[in-house]
Image (cartoon, coloured by chain):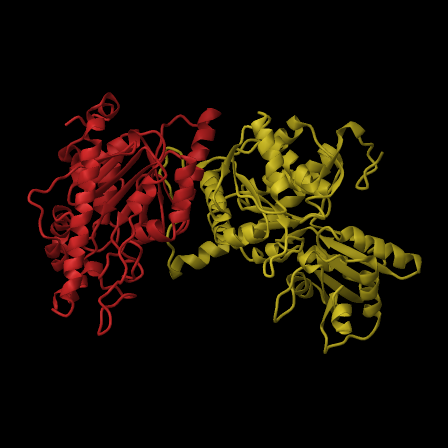
């Protein structure tokens, strides 16, 4: 596994995503992209869904990419990657291509949880070998902070504004990681931009697994979440250390938490770090904050039980193949 | 036996009785694309079923990518074609409607995907039978569109379509439209070329700048107003060039089999005073009606348009130059205006009298008598109050 110094050196030597892109100050997406791509040693080809990353990195006639990169539309990144991967297999079969490519999809939560879910599901079921990375910033940030299926309950967005009769988004977020897991693919994980070594290690395991693999990476969005750009890492650290965003991986159906924050911070502090949840603290609906905290706690306990259940497997010869016998 | 295209003697052993769908599948088997992403829809299913069996039997090397939707099928086709592999697909009706977003993108990204379309009415109401409303939805997408009139033509244009799509001056999707059921499901003798002849004719897929190469290209960038317009114009120019490069392709195809195609074809047009313009499988019915009227001494003719996009406006103007009155038969409607083939014809000719006829929506038959009635109508003064004649339906409306 490369350490962070190695990753930084690789990124500096030949940045897959270079400078000159127009993502916001404090945006978490470049951290996702650079960590993922610096962790892969084969040639890569990237398929990108429409969204912040695509718009900000390929304004014609410029490009921030130094790897093969393809964008077609918003909802079809997994389908496009299916075609690219099938072409690769066909070209390899007839000896028309020698390089050993790794295929990586980058899509936001809008392009993954919502409009791209069908294409993703189809591609997972068909078993195309690619790493699908969802950079999850919990909303449609490119179009001006609208709610998505990944937006947490109570978040203020431009389509779920808080107000006299509203406490922000009324619904809980979708658990995409488990939807993906239901396809029984070999490798599924959650990661975050506050824990880059953890992310890099997961990329390594994901790309060595047979078939499709999926990473749901919590990014962060200063204008969409309402915090100072310099606080990006700290805000996401809160999400992980409070248990709001558990860092986990599911290998061949076996669960494991990869970061165990001790002691866990308060989920309330995570909500308190961002203006999109400000109305939770105005004293109008105190029950809502308590209920959100309870939900997060119950979810943490559920994951801890799954982890305990699968501990033996990771110690078994099957689990040991993944080099995780800690 | 001689073909109706040519006096060259034909080898009967090359003929097989095939439906249009089977003929397209046979062309697919011989072309042997690298990737065939597809989603089933009536009346395209005979194509993909027959082709899937070819692959299962080891008679094609194609990777059939059984997508979960047409939108994904077309997306995968674009990905594969740009990656550097030959990709083809097939669809119809709602399937084409569902993939239409990506059909536009395929043209813009210059992905030379050949798409067989079993032309079928768009919902609603839902209907599985033939008309051209699906193809017309893709009219302005920037793809080459061909509407064939027989199973033989469906086979031939799939083969020629590969050359046209992948021509270095074009690099655009080519849509080969065959009328649902009338062509997809009806059997007729089809001359099949030798496998090696087709392979040699289409040649290897050689996309000029494949995604999977040592050169890191950026495909599908974001274009602001200062560039979008010029990129669009390049795409428009590429589509126009398809008409220019087509004759060399049809000539080289004619050398293989004697069948010489043109963007459009006149029948009894030499001295025609009244003419009709039509696309698709009803060409045979139109020629039968023309024969009938010619027997009565009427100078009538028919022009069948095969290449609809780019529209062969100069050839059409030439065909219709001496005609006094024209009826354009559209198998699609443009509610609130005139239908597509009519508008294109109107823009191409200077003939004062051009009538619009809409026929065959949702698979309704067009009879020789319907056509005779339209030719009779052309003899009478134009009726401005009722500018569109609905062949095979006006009579029913009047009875109500």
Q: Quadrant of residue A323?
A: top left
Residue A275 rendering spot, x and y as whole percentages: 16, 63
In this rendering, would B344 be left or right of A31? right
Residue at x 60% of width, y 37% of height: B49
Which residue is farthest top?
A317
Residue at x 70% of width, y 39% of height: B251
From the image, which quarter does the C terminus of chain B lie in?
bottom right
Q: Does residue A206 appear in the picture of this structure?
A: yes
Q: Is residue B352 above or below residue B179?
A: below
Front residue of A138/A263: it is: A263
Rendering colour (chain A): red
Residue at x 25% of width, y 43% of height: A33
From the image, which quarter does the N terminus of chain B lie in?
top right
Q: Quadrant of residue B366?
A: bottom right
Front residue of A48/B367: it is: B367
Which residue is farthest right?
B296
Rendering colour (chain B): yellow
Residue A44 rendering spot, x and y as whole percentages: 33, 35
Q: Is residue A55 above or below residue A144?
A: above
């Amino acid at each position: 596994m490369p350490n962070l110094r190695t990753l930084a050196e690789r990124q500096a030597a030949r940045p897959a995503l270079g400078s000159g892109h127009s993502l916001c100050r404090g945006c978490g997406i470049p951290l996702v992209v650079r960590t993922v791509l610096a962790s892969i040693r084969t040639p890569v080809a990237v398929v990108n869904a429409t969204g912040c990353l695509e718009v900000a990195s390929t304004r014609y006639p410029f490009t921030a990419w130094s790897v093969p990169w393809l964008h077609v539309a918003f909802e079809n990144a997994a389908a496009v990657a299916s075609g690219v991967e099938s072409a690769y297999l066909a070209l390899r079969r007839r000896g028309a291509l020698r390089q050993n490519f790794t295929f990586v999809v980058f899509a936001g939560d809008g392009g993954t949880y919502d409009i791209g879910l069908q294409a993703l599901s189809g591609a997972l079921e068909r078993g195309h070998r690619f790493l699908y990375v969802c950079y999850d910033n919990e909303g449609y940030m490119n179009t001006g902070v609208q709610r998505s299926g990944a937006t947490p309950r109570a978040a203020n967005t431009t389509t779920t504004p808080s107000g006299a009769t509203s406490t922000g988004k009324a619904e809980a977020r979708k658990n995409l990681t488990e939807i993906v897991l239901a396809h029984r693919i070999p490798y599924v994980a959650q990661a975050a931009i506050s824990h880059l070594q953890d992310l890099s290690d997961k990329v390594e395991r994901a790309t060595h697994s047979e078939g499709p693999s999926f990473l749901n990476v919590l990014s962060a969005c200063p204008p969409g979440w309402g915090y100072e750009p310099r606080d990006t890492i700290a805000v996401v650290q809160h999400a992980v250390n409070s248990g709001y965003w558990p860092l986990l991986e599911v290998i061949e159906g076996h669960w494991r938490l990869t970061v165990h924050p001790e002691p866990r911070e308060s989920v309330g502090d995570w909500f308190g770090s961002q203006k999109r949840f400000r109305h939770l603290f105005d004293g109008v609906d105190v029950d809502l904050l308590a209920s959100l905290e309870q939900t997060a706690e119950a979810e943490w306990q559920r994951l801890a039980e799954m982890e305990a259940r699968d501990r033996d497997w990771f110690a078994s010869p099957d689990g040991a193949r993944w080099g995780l016998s800690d | 036996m001689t073909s109706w295209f040519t006096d060259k003697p034909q080898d009967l052993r090359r003929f097989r009785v095939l439906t249009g769908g089977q003929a397209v599948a046979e062309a697919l088997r011989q072309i042997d694309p690298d990737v065939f992403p597809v989603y089933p829809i009536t009346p395209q299913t005979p194509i993909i079923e027959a082709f899937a069996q070819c692959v299962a039997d080891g008679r094609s090397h194609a990777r059939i990518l059984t997508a979960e939707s047409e939108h994904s099928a077309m997306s995968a086709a674009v990905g594969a074609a740009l990656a550097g592999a030959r990709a083809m697909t097939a669809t119809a009706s709602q399937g084409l409607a569902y993939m239409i977003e990506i059909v536009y993108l395929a043209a813009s990204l210059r992905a030379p995907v050949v798409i067989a379309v079993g032309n079928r009415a768009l919902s609603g109401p839902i209907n599985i039978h033939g008309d051209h409303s699906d193809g017309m939805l893709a009219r302005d997408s920037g793809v080459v569109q061909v509407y064939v009139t027989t199973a033989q033509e469906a086979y031939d244009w799939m083969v020629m379509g590969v050359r046209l799509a992948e021509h270095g001056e074009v690099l655009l999707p080519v849509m080969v439209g065959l009328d649902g059921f009338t062509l997809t499901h009806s059997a007729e003798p089809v001359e099949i070329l030798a496998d090696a002849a087709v392979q040699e004719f289409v040649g290897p897929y050689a996309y000029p700048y494949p995604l999977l190469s040592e050169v890191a290209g950026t495909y599908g960038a974001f274009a602001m107003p200062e560039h979008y317009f010029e990129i669009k114009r390049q795409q428009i120019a590429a589509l126009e060039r398809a008409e220019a490069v087509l004759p060399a392709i049809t000539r080289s195809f004619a050398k293989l089999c004697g069948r010489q195609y043109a963007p459009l074809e006149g029948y009894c047009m030499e001295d025609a005073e009244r003419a009709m313009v039509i696309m698709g499988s009803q060409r045979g019915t139109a020629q039968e009606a023309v024969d009938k009227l010619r027997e009565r001494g009427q100078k009538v003719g028919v022009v069948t348009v095969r290449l609809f996009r780019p529209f062969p406006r100069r050839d059409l103007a030439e065909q219709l130059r001496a005609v006094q009155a024209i009826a354009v038969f559209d198998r699609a409607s443009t509610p609130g205006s005139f239908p597509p083939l009519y508008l294109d014809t109107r823009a191409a000719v200077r003939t004062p009298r051009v009538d619009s006829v809409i026929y065959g929506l949702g698979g309704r038959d067009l009879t020789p008598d319907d056509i005779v009635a339209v030719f009779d109508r052309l003899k009478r003064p134009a009726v401005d109050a009722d500018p569109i004649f609905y062949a095979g339906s006006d009579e029913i409306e009047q009875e109500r």
